[in-house]
Image (cartoon, helix red, strand yellow):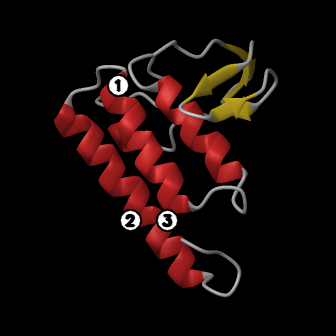
Amino acid sequence: MDRVVVQPIDKDKFRTYKDFSYHGVYIPKGFVTNGANIPRIFWSLFPPNSPEYLSAVVIHDYMCAKIGVFTYKEADDMFYRAMIDIGVSKWKAKLFYFWVKWYHRFKVFKNRSKLRY
C-alpha cells in the first residue's frame, strides 16, 4: 500500500499533497484531516499523526466525511484493513478499530434519527 503524503496547514490540520487511493476509495489532493482523534493523555503511546498509521487515519477520516456515500461501518472496517495492510501490529489495529467502532455506535445511538451505521 502506498503511503499518503500530507502537508501541515495548521496546528492540528494536514492537507493531502497528492491524490491517494486505497481499495476503491479515492481521496483527492487537498482533503484536510486532523489525524487520529486520540485523547491527549495517550499521545505518548499513540501520537495522533504517527506515520505508522496516518494513511489509514486519512482513509477513515475521508470516508467519515462522506457519510451517505459510505457508512460508519464501512469506514471502520476499511480503517482496520488499511492498518493491517500497512503493517500496524494486529493488537494495535484491533484496539484502534474497537474504539472507532465504539465511538460511531455511541454517536449513532445519540443521534439515531440523523445518522446511520
Of the two numbered discs 1 and 3 in the rendering, the one whose residue sits closer to the viewer: 1
Q: CA distance from mark 2 to mark 1?
A: 22 Å
Q: CA distance from mark 2 to mark 3?
A: 6 Å
Q: Residue at x 79, y 20 (%)?
A: 29
One can see residue 105 in this view: yes
Quarter of the image with the N terminus in it: top left
Q: Is residue 45 left or right of residue 100?
A: left
80 to 18, vertically: above or below: below
Q: Secondary structure at mark 1?
A: helix
Q: Secondary structure at mark 3?
A: helix
Q: Secondary structure at mark 2?
A: helix
Of the two numbered discs 2 and 1 in the rendering, the one whose residue sits closer to the viewer: 1
Quadrant of the image occupied by residue 19: top right
Q: Please tell me which of labels 1 and 3 falls first in the chain.
A: 1
What's under tag 1, amino acid-wise?
A: Asp
Classify 10 Å Cα crowding around label 1: few (below 14), some (14-19), many (20 and above). few
Quick one: 78 or 51, which is closer to the camera?
Answer: 78
Residue pointed to by mark 2? 102
